[in-house]
Amino acid sequence: MYIIFEGIDTCGKTTQIDLIAKDFKDVDVVITREPGGTNFGKKAREILLSNSLNSKRAELLLFLADRSEHYTEIIKPNRDKLILSDRGFLSGIGYALANGNFDFEYLVELNRFALEDSFPDLIILFET
């Protein structure tokens, strides 16, 4: 089962992921995050956090490249395990809508492409 945890920074996503992983100690659990869950993702995260990109489109495409790599490297080969991800495509869409002039339906289609039509089984949203 692939579950993403969504919410603002410091709302407790990572804490809850760790607690759930401990509760399911007899199950194969994969803990990951977006961006930054792969080697490419770590590099992409550094670029994104450095604010060195001037183009919102380049920023969006970097997020999507990370999402595709993350899906291929982490999610797809582990679909038979419990996958707990700190953020996912929903944060990417929300961020893109808040910071750029992008169409919602277009963003969904781009994410569908990056995720090979394989969305999470469950999304847990933390409201604060």
Image: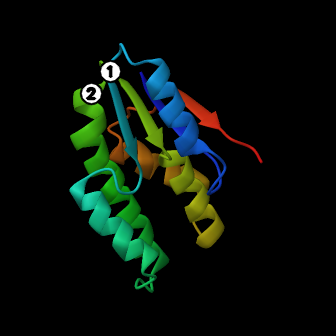
Label annotation for residue 20: none
**Residue at x 35%, y 72% (from the top left corner):** 46
Q: Tell me, what colour scheme is on the image?
A: rainbow
- Residue in view at x 56 percent, y 63 percent: 96
Q: Does the image show residue 79?
A: yes
From the viewer's side, name the closer residue of 108 and 87: 87
Query: Can you identify the residue that label 1 sits on?
Result: 81
Q: Is the residue 22 above or below the residue 64 in the image?
A: above
Residue neighbourhood size for the residue with mark 2, other residues' Cα within 10 Å, grouped as few (<14), some (14–19), many (≥20): some
**Residue 5, image quadrant:** top right
Task: Give the amino acid at mark 1.
Answer: Lys
Q: Depth check: 112 or 12 in front?
A: 12
Q: Crowding at label 1, few (<14), some or many (≥20) Cα neighbours within 10 Å? A: some
Q: Is residue 113 shown left or right of residue 6?
A: left
Identify which amino acid the numbered label 2 is placed on: Asn
10 in relation to 70, above or below: below
What x and y, as percent, mark residue 58? 39, 74
Q: Is residue 32 left or right of residue 40?
A: right
Write the residue at 39% across / 29% down: 83
What residue do we see at 41% from left, 21% from top?
Answer: 1
Q: Which residue is mark 2?
A: 78
Circles 2 and 1, Cβ within 8 Å, touching? The answer is: yes
Counting from the top left corner in percent of width and height, residue 76 is at: 26, 32
The local secondary structure at tag 1 comes to loop
**Residue 121: in sight, yes or no?**
no
